Each structure stands twice: as C-alpha cells, then as structure tokens.
Amino acid sequence: MAVFGIWLGALLTLCIYSFLYRDNPLYKFAEHVYVGISAGYFVAAEVHNVLLPNLIAPLRSDFGHRFYLLVPGLLGVMVFFAFSRRLNWLLRYPLSFVVGMGAGLTVTAMLSADVMAQVQATALPLNSVNNVLLAGGVLATLVYFFFSAEHKGAVGGVAAAGVWYLMIAFGAAFGYTVMARISLLIGRMQFLLGDWLHLLR
Amino acid sequence: MKGFFVGMMRIDRRWIFLAMALVVAGSLLSDIAFPRLEISPDVRRAYDLIDGLPSGSTVLFSWDYDPGSQPELYPLSAAMLRHALRRDLRIVMMGHWVTGVPLIEKQIAEVVRREFPDKRYGSDYVNLGYKSGQNVLVITMAKSIRDAFPADYYQTPLDSLPLMARCRTLRDARAVVSFSAGDPGLIMWIQFAWQRFHIPVTGGCTAVSAPEFSAYLQSGQLHGLMGGMRGAAEYETLVGVRGSASVGMTAQSLAHALIVVFILIGNVAYFAAGRGKEER
C-alpha cells in the first residue's frame, strides 16, 4: 500500500510539474483530483473532529446538562439557508454572531500584540546604531505614508529614506520567498529521487 | 554580441526551469556537503527555550501547516520534537490546520516510535488532533482543554490519559511551539498565548513569512524562530542530526547561486541590448 501511495504521489507530482512545459490535460486532471479530494477531506474531518465529539456526542450522552449546545448547533444549521432564496435572511443571525465575536476578539488581540507592544518595542533609547536605525526607519516609513503634506524639502527627504527602508524590506521578503519556493522544489526532488526512485543515499 | 544579448532577453523561460531542476537534482544526487552552518541567534534562542525547561515539563506543539509546506516545516518540527523528547519533556500535540493532522501521525511514527520507543502514549505525549475555532479554541483551552477537546485524536477520553490529568488548561504548558505556514499559526499564538496568558511562544515558519516575524522577535513577544528550511537545518545541526533540511542546504545554496547568475545575465543583457537607453 505504501508503494502504491508513493507511485501515485510521484505520478501526480509529475502531472502538476508538466504545467511548466505547457498547460495540458494531465495537469488539469491532477488539479481536479486535488481540489476534489481536499473538499471531501475537509468535510469528513470537520464532521469527525468537531461536529461528532463537540456537539452530537455530548448531546446524546448528557442532554439535560448540555441542551445549550442546541443554540450553536441551530446557528450552524442556519448557515445553510444561504442556499434558499426565500429564507436566506436567516443567514444574517449566525453571520452577525461570527462577525461580532470575531471582531471583538481580534481587535483587542491585535491592539495589544500588534500595536501597543510594537509601539513599546520601538520607543527605544537612541544609544546604539541598531536602535537609531530602527526608530529612524519606522519614522521615515511613516512619513512616506503621510499624504497630507507634499513630499518636498525635509518631508520629501525623510520620505525618500522611507522608500529605501521599504525597498530593503521588499528585497528581504523577495529573497525569503525565493528561498521558500526553492525549498519546495528540493522537497519534491527528495521525494522523487529518494522515496520513489531510491537514488539518494 | 548585441545579438547574443537580445537572444538572452527572449530566452524561453522553460530553459530556466530545466536549469533549476538539473542543479537541484544534481546537487542532491552528488551528495556534496557544504561547510557547517552558522547558527543564527533566533534559532539559538528557540533551542535555548526548549533546552532550559525542567525535565518533565509540559510543552504544547501545534502543527499549523499542511503538506504544501512539508519540505520546510516537517524537518523543522521533527528536529524540535526530537530535542523535546531527549529533554524528557511531555508533549501535547495538536493542529489548527485540518490537513496537517496526518503529518502529526507521520511524525509520531517516524520520530517518536522509531527513535524513542520507551516513550509512552498518554504519559509522555498526547495527540489531541485538529479542532476548528482558531483564537476561540485557544481561549477555550486556556479555560479548560477538556471543553475544547473532550477526547484525543483516537477518541480516547482525556480523563483516561495521565498526561492530561496534569495538563488541564493551556496555562499548564511551559511553552507553546507552533510550526506555522500562515494563519491560524504563530501570530495567533503570540496574540493569545503570549499576550494574554504570558506563555512563551516559539516555533518555525515558512521562509515566505519569516520577515514578518522580525517585529515580534525584536519586541520579545516571540522567543526565537526558525525560518524555513535554513532554520530547520540550523536546528538539526544543534541537535546533531543530518536530516532532510541539512541535506537540502547544498541544493538550496547552488539554486540561489544560479538565480544570482540569472539576475546578473538578465541585467547585463537588458542594458547591453539598449533597453535601458530606450526607457530613459
């Protein structure tokens, strides 16, 4: 069975890579297989990992104490009214719950972790080159994105420094992206040459 | 000469794909090993966090990636898992990505059972599996892991697992380690586990997302980081294992060199062909 899996994986990998030559039916086939299996897997996994243990099993074993679980269960069912033209207004209730709760949780978490903590970490004493570069970079980049004053004179100079900081950041990000894509190619090559063809020591 | 450069400007990109494939395959087949890797401070810090935990401490490992990021994050999670087991830490495993759960199983089979046969499921490690909910799940786990996971991945009630008797909430974990390919992942753990509950968070990410974590490292919200295959190779070096990331480093370096050559050729050809003048 393991050998069959390896052969299947190798052939599907080659089908996907054949797109690099040109679009073709083998690539389309592998793409559709991937999308179909992923969708089926997601549904089955959600049912087995979430719906059954967190909703169905508790309701069946102890309905008296867990009857409140009917509320999220009902909200979940209401999502499917999206497919009904007559009753799709019922979708608003679960959506408003999800959006409200999600916004409440995310806004506080982001303010705390991504705004306050970052501002605190940037307000550094300017007693080292690193700290000067960091604080200067943040200020210059913020000035670049400040559009209420024309980028001329001193403001233009600082904004230009901000552009340099942005370019360096983009360069670093692009370098990392190249590294990531090459890593994926290496991973597939290790699979094809090692697991499939047994050419690697 | 100009004709040559004009030709280079019009080269079919499939030749570039072929050159890249040949360089990567050739370096893997030739088994050339580059000199020892330098360990970056961020990887060292992640290593020190795990290394400094008292034996028997509970650590939560979260596999927040799918097979698409396997080449980068699988060797990374294997190296860190190996280190934690050598340190005799108790590991609670879970994942926020539904397609990542089979990778937990694979890692249990290939690392835990093969290299640490004396480690017992339920006492030394537990696999909680996947659950949706993301940040709500983390908050629920901070209140009670049982509310979030009534049973483990194999449908065993948590009360029958000795490790989970000691680890009742997320706050009982001494650290959270996330192997993250995006959201939900490391950022969410920082926002909730560290920022709300002050549980140290470390882990690894794909190289694509590594730059965005610099701010969290600088602010001290993230206790070390392994970025991509390079980070994995560094951690493998620290734990003394030559895994797939270390083996892949030579191919990675040669592929980068090839890209640099392509960029140089492209630029020389661009200006030699007179395109720069035309645009100016």
Image (cartoon, coloured by chain):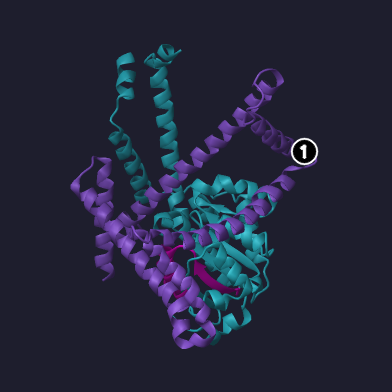
Q: Quadrant of residue B54?
A: bottom right
SS for dot 1: loop
Q: Residue at x 50, y 69 (%)?
A: B94
Reading the image, the residue beneath label 1 is A128
The quadrant the N terminus of chain B occupies is: top left
Residue B1 in sight here: no
Label 1 Cα neighbours within 10 Å, binned few <14 / some 14-19 / many ≥20: few
Q: Where residue A11 sits: x, y (%)?
A: 24, 56
| Frontmost residue, A46 versus A60 | A60
Q: Quadrant of residue A88?
A: bottom left
Q: Residue at x 20, y 44 (%)?
A: A24
Q: Where residue B156 sits: x, y (%)?
A: 47, 83
Q: Where residue B108 sits: x, y (%)?
A: 45, 72
SS assignment for the magenta stretch, majority:
helix
User: Left of B168 or right of it: where is A80?
Assistant: left
Which chain is cyan in the picture? B
Which chain letter goes with mark 1? A
Which chain is purple in the picture? A
Q: Where residue B122 sits: x, y (%)?
A: 52, 82
Looking at this view, name the residue that lies furthest to the front: A86
Q: Is residue B121 magenta?
A: no
Q: Magenta stretch: give its range.
A: B88-114
Q: Amino acid at mark 1?
A: Ser
A164 above or below B214? above
| Frontmost residue, A33 versus B60 | A33
Q: Residue at x 44, y 37 (%)?
A: B257
